[in-house]
Structure formats: structure tokens, C-alpha cells
Image (cartoon, rainbow, N blue to C red):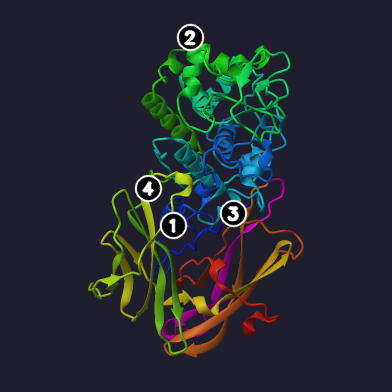
Amino acid sequence: MLVLTLFALFSLFHGLNSEPVDANGITLSEKIEALERQILNPTTLVFVVTPCSINSNDNPNRGEQTSAEWVRIVFHDMITANIEGPGLGGIDASIGFESDRPENIGIFINVTLAQSLPVSQFSQFSSVFLSMSDLIAVGLADALATCDPTVRRLPLRVGRIDATQAGPSGVPTPSDTLEFATAAFARAGFNQSEMIQAVACGHSLGGVHHTNFPDIGLFYDPVYDMDADSRVIVPDLGESNNTDGRSPFDSTPAVFDDTGVNEYLSGTGLQGGPLVVGPEATRSDLRIFSSDDNVTISAMASPQSFEDTCFTIFEKMLNTVPSVVTLSDPIVPRPWILRVSQLDLNSSGVVSFSGTITGHSSDPLPATASYTYETAGGSNTGIKTSQIGVPYPVLDNTPIGFGTITDYAFNDTIDSSITSINLESSYSAPINQNIFIIFSQSFRNPVIASVTVKQQYVIRVAILSTLIPAGSVLSAKLWWPAPQAGTVVPKIDNVSATMNFKATIHSYSVYEATISVGDGVTGMPSGTSTFQVTLGTTQASAKVDPSTWSICTNADLTTC
């Protein structure tokens, strides 16, 4: 699969942030901004699930559907909430530890959450800012956006915390009784009507696979799909790559719509799919849909009622989290954001600030973006203009709900009075010239043996010489996605190093440190690493993604 790298994330602030932080020292504001950058970039997670029918795993002939897998993983992660006690479980990525359970049969967990390419989907975008459980939520929203003809966006929140071990079993399966399913949903906080809604909405996409459920899934045939007893004959839907023998839930398995509901109610088309008209023992959808005499599912039979109901129930599923989690408010991406930025220092002591501004709108965007630099005294340096904007192409004619998205590059030299940047009078970000990682003087050296097995870095930072008391120590910290035993989900680990003085450049002192991660043998998970430099508790640099640093292969990285 195509390797996609999330753009660098930078939170530019003076000193240490006083906002509450998580275990990794990350604020909720930083997570919100990371989510904005994720969902406003059509080459990130939404690319993997576009178009809706795509199969983005390592074997495209299996007939799997990525969008349906992303919906399924939400249900399987969420439904075991509260089994071990009130406030425990829910959307917490514990599903990554549970892929070998019969109730989670299939490849959907390992493919969706895999640590490494070529099948990495969610993991390639994991970072200290976005947990895997937050990405599970993003995945559902992106899947619906590419599969829903109205391109409606599911409201998203951030702040979920990943589990460090497996949760309890208890996911209902097709052969379980109605009583078992009802009890499972009730424990998770969903009543009978919500159970019906969740199943009907989730089964608008994809289908059942014969390789996973031999008694249910139907073998593929060039003309017909049928089970061994010919109880059900399903018209060929043109699935030429279907070695897993998929039997769709409805006649539009790659469109999020009310087709399945209406085919069930009318007895036409696929009549509700294989979990309605398949073998009696596994007619779980039939048992659930008819449990209130079809009252709930009948109320979902119009396109608008189906969509409204499904978005409400999906949002409740995503917000079913452990009680220790504090979720943000629903996030609406701002019309203008600073997607990526960096400070740099040349040999003459001149500071430059460059990066990418991103705008989105359903109306035409300007050819260039306007911005101003603000000073400590409250004035500004006058309106500046970016380079000509570059709109993102609409992938496979599938918009993602944010209108036109355009990137605008900029690059300026700035003087020491500048403390922030203001974009289009709607977005402001601090610029910390007290201490910053020097982009042009920091390097990386990936050690590759078919896959990356080690990452080596030399990081250099500039700090105003007047801010360094005698005997002070600068520390460089790297957060990186590390392998985690028992799960395909990487964990965010960290390592620190003391920095050494290197040189003086005008008013700045330059320090450096080398850091290596990976054992040189084991393949490293994909994902985004992040650096930050601190001076005790008084100064902290921006957090920086090193993936865009230049590569240097010198044996001694300090000579780079």
C-alpha cells in the first residue's frame, strides 16, 4: 500500500503550557489541532478508504471492504464496555489485543490496526497527539464520508486513551441468542431500540465472508452467489475479486444508505442479507430487527430518518469510553489552520519562519492566503501574502465534506519582536523564538533492512544565550511509535537525552544531542515521531515531527 506520512505537527508556544496535560504531556488543545490537520488532509486516513468499495489490505482479491471493516472494528471495540465493571472499556483500542478470539474472527483487526507496512492503515497516523482509539473514531467518520452520498460528517471528539491489555470477551456473534445480544448492548448503555439501530446502520456496508462463517457466507459464482442448500440466491454484484466468498448485507454494499432496511421490510432484493435469510441458527439480524415487531427499523425506512438515526447512534458508540477519559467538545475544523511550520536559523543569526497554511470552504478560496505577524507590543508587521495556493484534487470524485481544501506555502525572515502569526484574521498561533529546534541543522538516518529497523537522529536547538543560567541542562525528548507485545497496535514510547553545547550564533547558543530508537533487527512500526527540547521547567520548544529532516548517513551524526 502507498506509504502516507502525516504532515509535521507543531504547537508553537512560549515556555511550558499551563493547560492540563495527559501522561505524555500533551494538552487537549494540541490533540484538537492534530485532528484538524488529520481530517483536512485528503492524503491521510481518508485516502485509505476512498472510494467506499476499496479493499486496502495486502491481498486485494479477498473481497474485503475497508470501509465495512472500519465500521466493524468500532462495534467490536465498544460493545464490551462495562463487562468488568462500570466505567471500564469502550472505545479504547483494546481490540488490538483480541484478534485471536473467535468472536473477532477475520482479518479486520490486524489489517486495520497493523503496526507495519504494507498493510498499515491506522498505525501509520498514530502519534503522541492522536491515540489509536481516537483514530478508530476518525476511521468511522472518514468511512461514512466516502460512503454516504450526502457527504455528511460524523462529529468527532478527541482525548481517548489506549488500553495496555486485552479487555473482556463478550462480542455478540451471529449464533448468539437475542437475550445475549440484548444484554451485551444494555451493559454498554444501549437499549433495545438502539441495539436495532446500531445493527441496521452497521450492516449498511459490506457483508459476511464464507471463509469466516462457512455456514453463513455464500460461495462466489460468476453468475450467482448461493449457499450449499440453495436457500438463498443472490444476484451477482460484479465482485470479481472475492476469494473469501462475501455475501453482501444489501444490494448497495459500498453505499451507506437505507437500502438494506427497505429490502428487509419489503422482502425484495437481498431481503436483509445473510443474517436475516441465512441458516436459522445464525439469523441474528432477523432476531434483533423483529424483536420489537419491526417498529424501530420501520422508522428508519426513509433516507433522512436512516441517516439521522445512524449518525446519532454512531456518535453514541464513539463516545462510549472508559470513565477516566475526558473527551473534547465536538470538533469543527476552523476555516484556516497552520498545517505545518518551522523556525530556522542561518549562520548569520537570521531567523526564518516557514510552513503551510491550509484553508477549506464550500465557496471559492482566494488565490493566495493573507496573514500578519504580531509583536509583543500588540502591533503587527502588515499584511503578507502566501505563495499561490495548491488545491487538493478530489480523490475518485469523492469529496470528504469540507469543500475545497487548499494549501498555501510561505517563507519569511522574522525579527525578534514577532511573537505570533494570524491567518486570515481567524486563526492565531504563537511563535516561540526563545528556544526552537533548528530545521536545517537537524538530521535523521533511517537504518533499513527491507524495512526500517532503527532510526538515528541528531537534533540541534537554538536558545537565546540570555536564557541559560550557569549549570542549566537542556534535554531533548523523542516520542516514537514502538512495538507492543500482544497487539498489532504500536505504543507511544519516549526517550530523552541531555544536549551538549555546540556553538554560538549571534544571540543564540546552539546545543545538540543524538538519539537512536529501534534495535536494528526488528521492523519498526509506522507512525509519527515527535521531538521537543526543554530547559528545566522554564522553556520548551515547539514539538516537531522529524520525518521531513534531511537524511545524513555519516557514522558520527554530530559531523552532519
Q: Secondary structure at mark 2?
A: loop
Q: Secondary structure at mark 4?
A: loop
Q: Report if residue 102 lies within the magenta region.
A: no
Identify which amino acid the numbered label 4 is placed on.
Answer: Phe
Whole-Å distance between the Cαs marked 3 and 1?
Answer: 19 Å
Task: Tell me whether circle 3 and circle 1 mark residues in contact (CB < 8 Å).
Answer: no
Whole-Å distance between the Cαs marked 3 and 4?
Answer: 23 Å
Identify which amino acid the numbered label 1 is placed on.
Answer: Glu
Report the mark closest to the observer, 2 or 1: 2
Name above or below for residue 56 compared with residue 287.
Answer: below
For disc 1, the marked residue is: 30
Residue sticking out furthest to the right: 521
Whole-Å distance between the Cαs marked 2 and 1?
Answer: 48 Å
For disc 4, the marked residue is: 402
Image quadrant assignment for residue 169: top right
Q: Residue at x 68, y 81 (%)?
A: 554
Is 229 in front, or is 274? Answer: 229
Give the percent coordinates (x, y) of residue 138: 49, 44
Q: Earlier in the sequence, mark 2 or mark 1?
A: 1
Marker disc for residue 293: 2
Segment colored magenta? 459-487
Report the mark closest to the observer, 4 or 1: 4
Q: Earlier in the sequence, mark 3 or mark 2?
A: 3
Left or right, 198 with respect to 558, comes to left
Residue sticking out furthest to the front: 223
Q: Earlier in the sequence, mark 3 or mark 1?
A: 1
Identify which amino acid the numbered label 2 is placed on.
Answer: Asp
Whole-Å distance between the Cαs marked 4 and 1?
Answer: 21 Å
Whole-Å distance between the Cαs marked 3 and 2?
Answer: 45 Å
Q: Residue at x 47, y 49 (%)?
A: 395
- Can the viewer see residue 98 in this picture? no
